[in-house]
Amino acid sequence: MSKRLVAVSAGLGRPSSTRLLADRLAAATGRHADVDVQVVELRELATDIAQNMVTGFPAPRLRAAVDAVTSADGLIAVTPVFTGSYSGLFKSFFDIIDKDALVGLPVLVAATGGTARHSLVLDHAMRPLFAYLRALVVPTAVYAASEDWASDGEGALAARIDRAGGELAAFLEARPVRRSVDPLDEPVIPFAQQLAALAVEG
């Protein structure tokens, strides 16, 4: 059975190197495991996220995105670096998610930035965030600076992406499929039958 993999991209531009990295990580994971991939673009949810922060109620599109993340078997989380850390949009989205909803969820973290000197964001910001949420962060995190997309750095970046995808796939294979229980799928026991059962117990 295919595992449900959700890739969250906090890229703001179009085209977005952050989205490109998310797509390549999802493809790399798919080369090692049977996955159905869904991409969540936070750019399209920016207004809904801001409104949820002040009202406490998610709009339908945001609710669907949160449900996709919390019911996934694995997660790829990619953010651009702003002021030495993840973007405010990225953090706000994960602030909306219940702090217990990602417990034990395999997560691959990745980031994009202008220069390699921001790569520590993976270890000083992203790993602590998902450690707080008690997710399982795969060992290899991926940072892509502008120069990594050039032809000279493509080989090294491609190798990191493939290694990280393989690690996430191994986590997914080792973990049972997550399926939320729909209360409407529960069988309805006729009232008379429930009364009869009480009479037998009494």
Image (cartoon, rainbow, N blue to C red):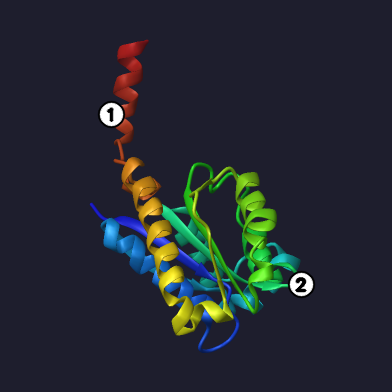
Residue at the far left in the pictured view = 1
Tag 2 and tag 1, C-beta contact below 8 Å: no
Quadrant the C terminus occupies: top left
Query: Where, by quadrant of the figure, is residue 111 drawn?
Result: bottom right
- Residue at the image position 67 percent from the left and 63 percent from the top: 91
Which of the labelled discs sits on residue 70, or is there none?
Answer: none
Q: Nearer the viewer, residue 74 or 152?
A: 152
Chain-order first, disc 2 or disc 1 = 2
Q: Looking at the image, can residue 57 be seen?
A: no
Q: Nearer the viewer, residue 132 or 18?
A: 18
- Residue at the image position 58 percent from the left and 86 percent from the top: 13
Separation of residues labelled 2 and 1 (CA atoms)? 64 Å
- Residue at the image position 36 percent from the left and 55 percent from the top: 166
- Circle 1 residues within 10 Å: few <14, some 14–19, many ≥20: few
In the shown orientation, is residue 89 left or right of residue 110?
right
Type of residue at label 2? Thr
Residue at the far bottom in the pictured view = 14
Which residue in the structure is indicated by mark 1? 193
Q: How many labels sit on residues?
A: 2
**Disc 2 versus disc 1: nearer the observer:** 2
In the shown orientation, is residue 154 left or right of residue 62?
left
Type of residue at label 1? Gln
**What percent of the width, then of the height, locates residue 119?**
64, 65
Q: Secondary structure at mark 2?
A: loop
**What percent of the width, then of the height, locates residue 18?**
53, 76
**What percent of the width, then of the height, locates residue 76?**
47, 61
Which of the labelled discs sits on residue 83, or is there none?
Answer: 2
- Circle 2 residues within 10 Å: few <14, some 14–19, many ≥20: few
Q: Looking at the image, can residue 70 be seen?
A: yes
